[in-house]
Image (spheres, rainbow, N blue to C red):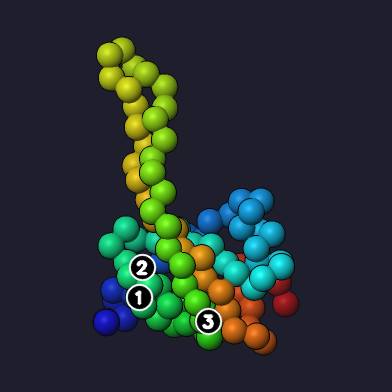
Amino acid sequence: MSQERLMKVLLAPHVSEKSLGLGDANKQFVFRIDRTATKQEVKDAVELMFDVKVNDVRTVNVKGKTKGQTGRNAGRRANWKKAYVSLQDGFDIDFMGAE
C-alpha cells in the first residue's frame, strides 16, 4: 500500500456522544473512512498518521437516510462507512492537540 493511498483512507473523526463515550471508556476511536477501504488499510493509516499501535479495527457500512421530499422525488443522503479503532495499552489519540 502506498502512502498516498493511506492518506486518503481516513476522511474525518466521527464525533458523537457514543463515540466520545467509547474513547473515554475503551480507548476506541471512530473515524469516517473511504467506502472502499479495508480493515488493514485503516489500521495502517491510523498508525501512520497518529503514531500509535492499533489493536483491532471494526468497520460498519452506514445506510444514508431518506430526507424531505422535493416534489415527486424523495431526497436521500449518501451511504458511508465508519471504522471503530481500538488502540493498544499505553497509546492515545488527542484530536485537540492540547499539551
Residues at marks 1 and 2 touching, judged by CB atoms closer than 8 Å:
yes
Q: What residue is pinned by disc 1?
A: 41
Return the mark for residue 55: 3
Q: What residue is pinned by disc 2?
A: 9
Image coordinates of residue 42 in percent, x first then y, are: 40, 73
Q: Which numbered disc, 3 or 1, marks the residue that appears first in the sequence? A: 1
Q: Which numbered disc, 2 or 3, marks the residue that appears first in the sequence? A: 2
Residue placed farthest to the top in the image?
71
The Cα atoms of the two marked residues, 1 and 2, are separated by 7 Å
Judge from the rendering whether residue 43 lies leftward or rightward of residue 95; answer left or right. left
Kind of element beneath mark 3: strand
Decide which of 60, 19 is in the foreground and name it: 60
Judge from the rendering whether residue 89 lies leftward or rightward of residue 3; answer left or right. right
Residues at marks 2 and 3 touching, judged by CB atoms closer than 8 Å:
no
Question: For the residue marked with disc 2, what is the amino acid?
Answer: Val
Judge from the rendering whether residue 58 lies leftward or rightward of residue 72; answer left or right. right
| x 43%, y 78%: residue | 43
| x 35%, y 75%: residue | 41
